[in-house]
Amino acid sequence: MIGLYPTWFEPGVGSGWIVGIIATIHVLASHTSVGAAVFFAGLAVYAHRVDKPEYLDFIRRYGLFLLVFSYVIGSITGPGIWYSTTVASPRGISALIHSFVWKWATEWVFFVIEVVGVYMLVYLAGKVDRRTHLNIALVFGLAGYTTMLIIIGILSFMMWPGQPEWFTDGGYLNGFYGANTWAQLALRTAFMLTMTAVVGGIVASRFEDADVKRRVLRVLAWVGIVSTVAGALLQRWYLATLPESALVVLENRMPAGYAPAMATVLALTLAWFVWTLVQPRRVHMAMASVMTVALLVLGLWPGETTRESIRKPFVAGQYVYSNQVIARDVPGMGIRSELPALEAHGFLKLHPFAPDALRQVDGSNLLEAGRFLALTTCSNCHSLTNTGMRPLARYFGGNTDVPALAAYLQAALSTGNTMYMPTIPLRDDEAEALATYIASLSDPAAAQAWVDRRTRQAAVLPSVADDAEGAPR
Ligand code: HEC
């Protein structure tokens, strides 16, 4: 047996999308608040220097808005990511915890400082002297940014460990700091300021005093323009720090409309900031809110799902596959690849949660065994229904020729040479079972005909497996 867990199956969407939806909302909330923390620190310094108390009033209002929305949404979706990823990808999370548990503990310390900081910033405004308020803003900004730095070290480890020595020597700093860490930090810093500037428009548009509104919107517009342009430029640096497999997926497997769509979002965002710069009076809360949702749906969702896609076939550290199998030896962590054992004995024998009735494939359980294999080895990345994430049936073009499907599965998956899919060692009987299940997705009758044929054969031959291999096991 290998240490696999039960699979979380979410019909209609796939567990990956549930994680993705929670995570994207979390990114909006967390990036906006971290961006705001940094922005507030800068704006507070500026407001004190030029003696413009209306900017401090804006900080107080925006801080209160974030307390009610961002911090509440962030604190719900944050644990939501933990819950959903723990069920969707227990071994991915386990890999991260084994490397970074103290990093996370550190992050929580800074997060607590950040939360206390935002309360102090809002409720002590005007009640403490300026110097103290400025210091609160600076501590808030630093604490917020530190939480981001720590999380990004972990996120970039998920793409690939910082230094190659990590695989042989372990050491959490080796895993944490790499070229991708800095590039991703820079890229996210830029885009989080963009988000802060867009969401800030919701608050700024509510100033009654037209002059104050104009000035605050102008500051936001310039922050937005500079950060959006910087983000667009920094993307090139980020791309240069990706593993080769990521670039293969990015170049060959993304929808054709992806690059133009992202360029459109950037152009739209810039247009929004320019418009708020020249027409501040006409900015309404509703428009700023629509713009926020547009950024969430058109910018964040594709951006984050792309980062997830290009990390395939791995979920973490280039050694845990998305389907939870450990794919390589990591001597530095005392981890051994599970592929040789799977090649020798197959999933049905080694998966601890396989029903006993499926451990041996025969005519009568072909479909059930195939469904089990699809659930455990494919459904982390492919939805098994017609909707959601990369629906499996769609990739087979309605083909119901079971032997041909089985041969294709073994050629494409057992060898691992697609680069974006894991190596999935399928024994002959397993490939046939999975092929029968895949055929049933587009034509249940055809699959049933194959099952019936095999069942009739099984009346003569004890099992398909014996038939396929010529010797009983
Ligand atoms: C780690 C995630 C992952 C797993 C697990 C996975 N796939 Fe895929 N698969 C992908 C990605 C990514 C693509 C490319 C998607 C695209 O181009 O839209 C893909 C594409 C495919 C294709 C099209 C191949 C091609 O080159 O055009 C087939 C067929 C396929 N998968 C079948 C399967 C089957 C069957 C399983 C389970 C035995 C499986 N996949 C498991 C990620 C995965």
Image (tube, rainbow, N blue to C red):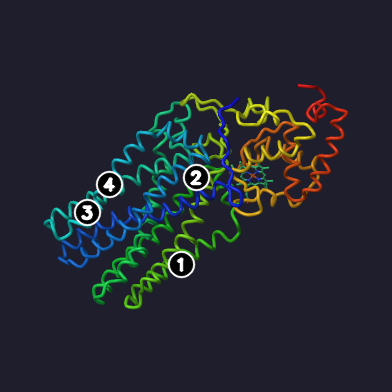
Q: Which mark is residue 143?
A: 4
Report the Cα–Cα distance between label 2 and label 1: 25 Å
Amino acid type of disc 1? Ala
The verdict on label 4 being within 8 Å of ligand 1 is: no
| Other residues around mark 4 within 10 Å, as few (<14) / some (14–19) / many (≥20) | many
Q: Which mark is residue 137?
A: 3
Helix, strand or loop at mark 1: helix
Say which quadrant the C terminus sits in: top right
User: Where does the image place residue 223, in percent across and percent down from the top left?
Assistant: 32, 63
Mark in front: 2 vs 3? 3
Q: Could you tell me if the residues under marks 1 and 4 are in contact, i.e. CB atoms within 8 Å?
A: no
State the residue in front, 340 or 368.
Answer: 368
Report the Cα–Cα distance between label 2 and label 4: 28 Å
User: Where does the image place residue 128, in percent across and percent down from the top left?
Assistant: 12, 56
Q: Which mark is residue 183?
A: none
Helix, strand or loop at mark 3: helix
The correct choice, above or below, for 299 with respect to 102 in the image is below
Instruction: Kindly identify the residue that appears in the image at 70 percent across and 31 percent down.
Output: 358
Q: Is residue 43 left or right of residue 401?
A: left
Amino acid type of disc 4? Ala
| Other residues around mark 3 within 10 Å, as few (<14) / some (14–19) / many (≥20) | many
What residue is pinned by disc 2?
242
User: Where does the image place residue 310, in percent across and percent down from the top left?
Assistant: 54, 47
Mark in front: 1 vs 4? 4
Q: Is residue 263 left or right of residue 254?
A: left
User: Where does the image place residue 344, in percent across and percent down from the top left?
Assistant: 68, 25
